[in-house]
Amino acid sequence: MQRYFVEPANWQDNRIILRGQDAHHIIRVMRMKTGETIICVHPDGHAAKCEIDELASDYVAVSAVEKVDMNTEMPVSVSIAQGLPKGDKLEWIVQKGTELGAAAFLPFQAARSVVKWDEKKKDKKRQRLEKIAKEAAEQSSRLIIPAIEDVQSFQMLLDSSDTYKHKLFAYEEAAKGLKAEPLRSVFQHISPSDNVLVVIGPEGGFSESEADALQDAGFAPIRLGPRILRTETAPLYMLASLSYHFEE
Amino acid sequence: MQRYFVEPANWQDNRIILRGQDAHHIIRVMRMKTGETIICVHPDGHAAKCEIDELASDYVAVSAVEKVDMNTEMPVSVSIAQGLPKGDKLEWIVQKGTELGAAAFLPFQAARSVVKWDEKKKDKKRQRLEKIAKEAAEQSSRLIIPAIEDVQSFQMLLDSSDTYKHKLFAYEEAAKGLKAEPLRSVFQHISPSDNVLVVIGPEGGFSESEADALQDAGFAPIRLGPRILRTETAPLYMLASLSYHFEE
């Protein structure tokens, strides 16, 4: 059943109003009729099966008929800090990462990031990523839309990292067999409801000084399997492994 | 270190000759000099660290100086049968799936596949996918290049499936909580050196008759986490989970 995230302001008891792109999607794209059902998700994470009462030109009115209480959220809250990659890779890291249960995405300017986001680009990029996250969250039946943070510097990332209980970074050297706990034993220290920050480097990986700074700041190096993963594949391996460990 | 898969014919004892695109890559792209080292991988899966002796216009001669015996292959042999998806999705399923350790890719024409591959298209597509698999295998330091099978019909897929010890299919209904063993207990029946066939539907998923036929043919429905994954995300979740289970 089609899902839509609806602003708290548009919930009046059992009556819910969908506007803008969601209304357009229901009326023009799905061509739904009154009496048909959708799922509305409240930003606080509760969801309701709703019946369409009214299809206006610019809004859709539905009434909640049944609570949906299937939890599709990862028990662990996983934030992915991604060194800015080339091209549109970040867009599909956000799309796939949302499907795989990420709680938030924190893009950062890494030493080896080829691209730079100027002030003007920044907001456009974030808005585009927010749209991708919302659509992926609806399609994958998430109960929350992952947050997209503003792009930040590497230092800002380190400075704000103490709010996370577990701090990890994917270190290519670790995949090559050098110093790193097996992922399984790293996960065994993580409890449901913990929050985890995973830092992934851009195409060139981390510079040596970044890798040192991460370890000084209390980040543990992890390997994501024995093969060398591209920057856009690493967060997906991490999220799928966590999902398997905690949800399967 | 840069890796290249070299045909058996080009190995003469310790002297190895690289030609064609690999030679071009070493000479023009990497601009390497004599004395520098690369890793050559033999199709039988052994690899050697090699020193460049000679850079000709159309070939590069190297000598093996050291055996490389780090095993980067998944203990389980996993073949991904993918219902033909839209656009270039299959290309990146092959790229990411190769990074994540897949042994082979079997594209098939599913009931809900929107695209069709005619005879002429078929070979071009397979050759392109083979190139992508080779490059991804080199980049991710695999010891084998995953095989790309010709596109086949759903029936051919069923008929040829008995060579696999474990036969699974990703069933969306399973993600919705209906009948399906947890992935963990499915994996517990799999031993290293077993071969596994995982069938993934196209965008629309499996038709009901396909799902029935798969179960009649002995395929077990599996869920890949509680969220609904896009067709191109499902094989990556499967491969990452297997890697985590058997390699971490």
Image (cartoon, coloured by chain):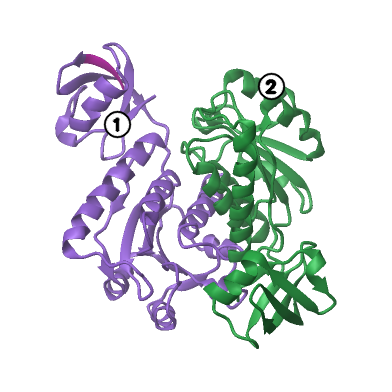
Chain colours: A purple, B green
Question: Looking at the picture, how far across and down is residue A48, in whole percent?
Answer: 31, 26
Chain bearing mark 2: B
Question: Looking at the picture, how far across and down is residue A245, in whole percent?
Answer: 55, 51
Depth check: B237 or B2 in front? Answer: B2
Residue drawn 70% across the image and 51% down it: B103
Residue type (three-letter) at the residue carrying disc 1: Tyr
On screen, residue A182 above or below B215: below
Residue that badge 2 annotates:
B213
Extreme residue toward the bottom, this view? B35
Depth check: A69 or A43 in front? Answer: A43
Chain bearing mark 1: A
Residue type (three-letter) at the residue carrying disc 2: Ala
Secondary structure beneath dot 2 equals helix
Are both tags, 1 and 2, on one chain? Answer: no
Residue that badge 1 annotates:
A4
Q: Which residues are magenta?
A: A49-53
> Is A191 contained in the magenta span?
no
